[in-house]
Structures are given as structure tokens and as C-alpha cells.
Image (cartoon, rainbow, N blue to C red):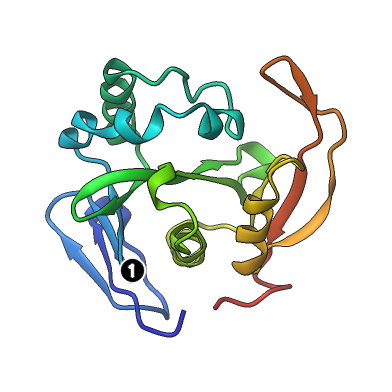
Amino acid sequence: MARSICYEIGRSGGYAGAGPLVKSTEISTMTIDCTTFTIRSWQESDALNLADYANDKEIWLNLRDRFPYPYTATDAADWVTFAIGVQPETNFAIAINGKAVGGIGLILGEDIQRCSAEVGYWLGRAYWGKGIISEALIAFTAYAFRRFELTRLYAVPYLRNPASMRVLEKAGYQYEGTMRQSAIKDKEVLDPALYAFVPALGSFH
């Protein structure tokens, strides 16, 4: 990204090293200020309006089944409670004017794959086509490598979702192959693509 990004990370999420300015706070929160939006820790108040953006079948069709549809106010409250309680913090809200309109996060690998993590994201339909997810993924990728001891981030968008693949490519992720017939969504067997960002092989924006 052309401009600098300021990260605010709580005591349990601090890190050292080169990169954008890091500020510690007394509470465990994270904030990345971007051009027209913020990536930040989930807040209890986010549950009030989250379903307005998440209750969309087209969003659900491109995510895992644990993201529910229909997406109710109860689902929103349960998710926010879960996300706030997870340590280390790996799931974050994409907020515009203080309101959560999407999400981005990691599934950290375990055992011998503890040096890698899967990244996922979604955004409310009203904000599609504005470059928000592309910018968010660039900023979040940089944050993830500084916050965690990772050598690799990857994502598995469905081949039927070329928009998500373009987002990954804009963020420097490279196509590694297709995992044929390896997922099922809404009773349809799908081919997910595999995209990865490996710092030793790519470069941050």
C-alpha cells in the first residue's frame, strides 16, 4: 500500500520488528486504519447490526457451512461472543464509520503445519466493487506475518468465485493448483482453488 498503516495491538497481541508503527494499549484490541474503513477487534455492539450484512445467501454460498444462513441476530451475538473470547485473537471486523460490515481472519495451522494459516474474508453486498476487500487483505496479510510466526498464508476460494481469486492475486497470493471435487456446498460438489502467500517467494505491497 502506498500510505503507511498504523496498528494498535493490545498487550497479548504485541510484536516487534520492522514495519508500520505499533502501539500497545491496556486492553487486548487490534486496529488497522485503512483508506475508507478499519480492520479491528470485534466488539459486543457489533452484534446489533451484523445480521443486516451477513444474512445474504450469495455470501454464504462462498463460505464454509459454519457461517450460517439465514444469519440471525442470535447468530451474530454468538459469533461476536466467540470471536472476542478466542486467544490469540484471529478474527476481526471490517468496519465502516464504526459499524461492522464484514470480517477477515485466520485459521491457524496445528502440529507440523503450525507455521501456516488459512485466511478468509467476507463483506456485505452494499460494499462490493469498491476495492475494500483487496485493500483489507493486503493490510491483514502484512499484519498476520508480523503478529504470528508464520511462513505461509493460504486461501481456498471456489473456482466459481473468480472475484475472490482476483482479490487474492491483487494481494500477491499465487495460484498453486486446484483441489478437485474436495468440497461440497449447498449439495453441490466443488473445486476449490489453492492460493498462497509465501514471503520468501512474494513481496508485500
Q: Nearer the viewer, residue 171 or 86?
A: 171
Label 1 neighbourhood size at 10 Å, few (<14), some (14-19), many (20+)?
Answer: some
Q: Amino acid at mark 1?
A: Cys
Which quadrant of the structure image shows residue 150? bottom right
**Vertical relation: 118 (above or below) 8:** above
Residue 171 position within the rendered picture, expressed as x and y whole percent measured from the top left: 59, 67
In the orientation shown, which residue stands out farthest toward the bottom?
2
Look at the picture and state if 116 lies above or below 70: below
Left-right relation of 13 to 144 = left
Q: Is residue 89 visible?
A: no
**Residue beneath disc 1:** 34
Choose between 202 and 188: the one closer to the eye: 188
Which residue appears at 61% of the width and 37% of the height?
110
Q: Residue furthest left?
A: 26
Image height of 14 relative to 71, above or below: below
Q: Where does the image place residue 21, in percent across and percent down from the top left? A: 29, 78
Query: Where does residue 185 sit, x and y in percent of width and height?
Result: 68, 22
Identify the residue at horizontal 76%, vertical 39% (top origin).
192
The residue lying at 51 percent from left, 22 percent from top is: 66
Q: Does 182 sit left or right of 15 as displayed?
A: right
Name the secondary structure under disc 1. Answer: loop
How many marks the image carries: the answer is: 1
Q: Where residue 34 appears, x then y in whole percent?
A: 33, 68
Left or right: residue 100 compared with residue 180: left
Quarter containing the C terminus: bottom right
Confirm whether residue 15 shows in the render: yes
Q: Is residue 123 left or right of residue 112?
A: left
